């Protein structure tokens, strides 16, 4: 049986480390990191995710700034809010919760966030540096960073390994493949137009699954002893649950855990780590800011 990587436990360890650093900054500079979260409209999933972030900030001593805007807000008003946060010296990280309503150009809004405060790591310049050899982005995107952190803290070495990333989204698949490449893996990306994905996945020492397809990756697709990081969070109907559904990953956990060396569960794997990486990025941004201005 695979070693199950407990994302909650790893996240808790990292959060203790962050809280310690926040206390040290507070003593040294009399200031703490600040994270601003901008949310447009009232999507249930976005609201609950933002709630988690607020709670986490409070626990770690990070100051939380909440900007709640109506669904109908104009693009220019949203950008004005971003500019205000760019100019606010107490804010070290700005996160605009995605997806945005259809009438707003996501790319335009994200590129207005100050590079120094882009804690989501999605600014074109941050992604560009991530894609280039010997360049370091100011911030790494949170979910891919969480994947790499889970591997390294579980003792999985990446250097020289064959890694397959399933999915090519801007948020997870693409940046995860770039991070694996930076860590000296040999990387293949499998996507919806890839013929016979199982034959490619079967050769991987490391699999990062981020396709958004419930239980698509079967146990027979996994190389014995491989490390499997499952980013998928898919709701599937389950009449036995009070909610009427349960969450499953992109990997068939019951099958894959009999073959893999390491595997993350869903829920409780990558999810708790993603918010923690956001807080870690906010801390990094604050440290850079305090050191520059001191």
Image: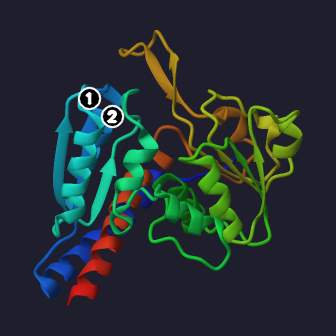
- Front position in the image: 294 or 265: 294
* Percent of width and height locating residue 114: 34, 63
Q: Nearer the viewer, residue 256 or 47?
A: 47
Residue at the spot of label 2: 46
Q: Quadrant of residue 162?
A: bottom right
Residue annotated with mark 1: 41
Image spot of residue 199 (x, y percent): 89, 40
User: Residue 276 or 190: which is nearer the viewer?
Assistant: 190
Label 1–label 2 contact, CB within 8 A: yes
Please, which residue is most extreme toward the top here? 239
Alpha carbon distance from label 1 to label 2 = 9 Å
Judge from the rendering whether residue 131 lies leftward or rightward of residue 27; answer left or right.
Answer: right
Q: Residue at x 51, y 34 (%)?
A: 233
Instruction: Name the residue: 80% across, 71% down.
Output: 160
- Which quadrant would the C terminus be assigned to in this image? bottom left
- Residue lying at 79% horizontally and 32% vertically, measured from the top left: 193
Image vertical order of residue 59 relative to residue 189, above or below: below
């Amino acid at each position: 049986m695979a070693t199950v990587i407990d994302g909650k436990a790893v996240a808790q360890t990292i959060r203790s480390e962050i809280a310690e650093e926040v206390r040290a900054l507070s003593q040294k500079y009399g200031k703490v990191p600040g994270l601003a979260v901008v949310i447009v409209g009232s999507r249930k999933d976005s609201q609950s995710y933002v709630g988690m972030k607020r709670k986490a900030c409070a626990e770690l001593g990070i100051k939380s700034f909440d900007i709640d805007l109506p669904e109908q807000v104009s693009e220019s008003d949203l950008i004005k809010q971003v500019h205000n946060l760019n100019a606010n010296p107490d804010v070290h990280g700005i996160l605009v919760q995605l997806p945005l309503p259809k009438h707003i150009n996501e790319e335009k809004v994200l590129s207005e966030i100050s590079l120094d405060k882009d804690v989501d790591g999605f600014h074109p310049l941050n992604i560009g540096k991530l894609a280039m050899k010997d360049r370091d982005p100011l911030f790494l995107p949170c979910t891919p960073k969480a994947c790499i952190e889970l591997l390294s803290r579980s003792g999985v070495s990446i250097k020289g390994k064959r890694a397959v990333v399933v999915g090519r989204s801007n948020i997870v698949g693409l940046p995860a493949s770039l991070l694996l490449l930076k860590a000296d893996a040999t990387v293949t990306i499998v996507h919806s137009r890839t013929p016979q994905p199982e034959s490619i996945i079967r050769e991987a020492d490391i699999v990062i699954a981020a396709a958004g397809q419930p239980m698509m990756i079967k146990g027979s697709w996994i190389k014995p002893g491989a490390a499997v990081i499952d980013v998928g969070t898919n709701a599937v109907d389950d009449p036995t649950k009070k909610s009427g559904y349960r969450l499953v990953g992109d990997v068939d956990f019951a099958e894959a855990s009999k073959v893999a060396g390491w595997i993350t569960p869903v829920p409780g794997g990558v999810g708790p780590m993603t918010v923690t990486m956001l807080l870690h990025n906010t801390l990094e941004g604050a440290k850079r800011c305090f050191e520059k201005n001191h």
